Image (cartoon, rainbow, N blue to C red):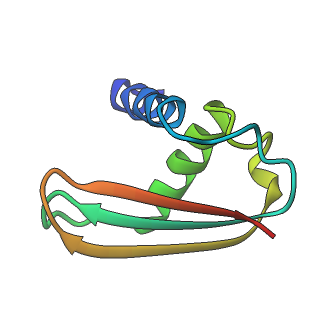
Amino acid sequence: MTKRGKEFRNEVCHEILNSERIGQLKGRLFIGIELTAPDKRKRDIDNHVKSVLDALQHAGVFEDDAQVDLLRVARLHVESPGACDVTITEL
């Protein structure tokens, strides 16, 4: 894993630890991901999905990303420093 990948995973873990989340999700899941790019450089949207799901799994949000039955990914406007907003719902 790259240095930036490890930094992202650590940021996700930090956010999860500071959230009001209660316990690990065990059921089937819907995950919505909204990406805000920091600049206008070309990016493949699918490259972000794997990183987000792996970081959430590492943070203990769910046991395995195989639990995801429905996934929605949207690229929004450009706004520095960029953002990734995630919604998770048990189905």
Q: Give how far across and how far down residue 63 sits, in percent.
A: 80, 39
Q: Is residue 60 above or below residue 82?
A: above
Q: Give how far across and how far down residue 4 sits, in percent.
A: 33, 31
Tell me what residue is drawn at x 51 percent, y 46 percent. Answer: 51
Tell me what residue is drawn at x 37 percent, y 27 percent. Answer: 7
Tell me what residue is drawn at x 45 percent, y 28 percent. Answer: 14
Quarter of the rendering containing residue 22: top right
Q: Give how far across and how far down residue 29 sits, in percent.
A: 76, 63
User: Is residue 43 something that shows in the picture?
Assistant: no
Side of 14 relative to 17 (left or right):
left
Q: Give how far across and how far down residue 11 sits, in percent.
A: 40, 32
Q: Is residue 91 above or below residue 7?
A: below
User: Is residue 75 something that shows in the picture?
Assistant: yes
Tell me what residue is drawn at x 17 percent, y 57 percent. Answer: 38
Side of 81 relative to 46 (left or right):
left
Pick the residue in front: 45 or 8. 8
Q: Residue furthest right?
A: 27
